Image: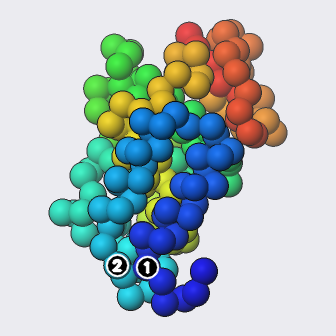
Amino acid sequence: MRDGEGGRDMARSWWRRAKRRAGLTLVAALALTALASSWGPAPNRGAVALSLWDDPAALAPETRCLAQAVYFEARGEPFEGQLAVAEVVLNRVGDARYPDTVCGVVFENELRRDACQFSFACDGRSDRPREARPWARAVLTASLVREGGLRSLTGAATHYHADWVRPGWSRVLDPTVRIGAHRFYRE
């Protein structure tokens, strides 16, 4: 891709590859294409994606919170893994034991250093995305999942962890699936 091309072309190209990898249905593919085409042209590749962070009118707060979870928890994962992380957040929203909003779930216990639900929320580092392309993917993934697309990957999981950690709760919850570098569980 040339530097002068807009974010819309970047998003479409990524989603074409993601659709092939994930085997999305025609309906989901059409939804993704419509969402990607709603972005206007941008002066450079990074401007569209990161402008969604700064412009409150461009991105609803709940979508932003879900996109942050996807970005910080799964930006290096395959498309299916990013969807699965978003699904866990929404599974918690629908569970009476957790806050009833996306932002409430994502930032639950954020003031307890290294003791929150999603590690990026309380690790003391900035929660602002720095990489345009992964942020654009996270926003599109969050938008798709919030609109009701593709929510059956994790078997109703409410928890997950990376392969390289072994939290104590993983021994008492029911494992459901492994996607990318994450293992998913339900209570």
- Tell me if 77 is positioned left or right of 72 in this view: right
Q: Position of residue 80 (x, y in %)?
A: 62, 39
Which residue is at 36% across, 25% downward? 93
Image quadrant where residue 161 sits: top right
| Real-space Cα separation, disc 1 to disc 2, in angstroms | 5 Å
**Mark 1: which amino acid?**
Gly
**Mark 2: which amino acid?**
Pro
Give the residue number, with chain letter if any, for mark 1.
6
Q: Quadrant of the N terminus?
A: bottom right
How packed is label 1: few (under 14 Cα within 10 Å), some, or many (20 or more)?
Answer: many
How packed is label 2: few (under 14 Cα within 10 Å), some, or many (20 or more)?
Answer: some
Which residue is at 49% across, 62% downward? 12
Q: Position of residue 19 (x, y in %)?
A: 59, 46
SS at mark 2 in the image? loop
Which residue is at 79% across, 36% downward? 163
Which residue is at 54% across, 55% downward? 15
Give the residue number, with chain letter if any, for mark 2.
41
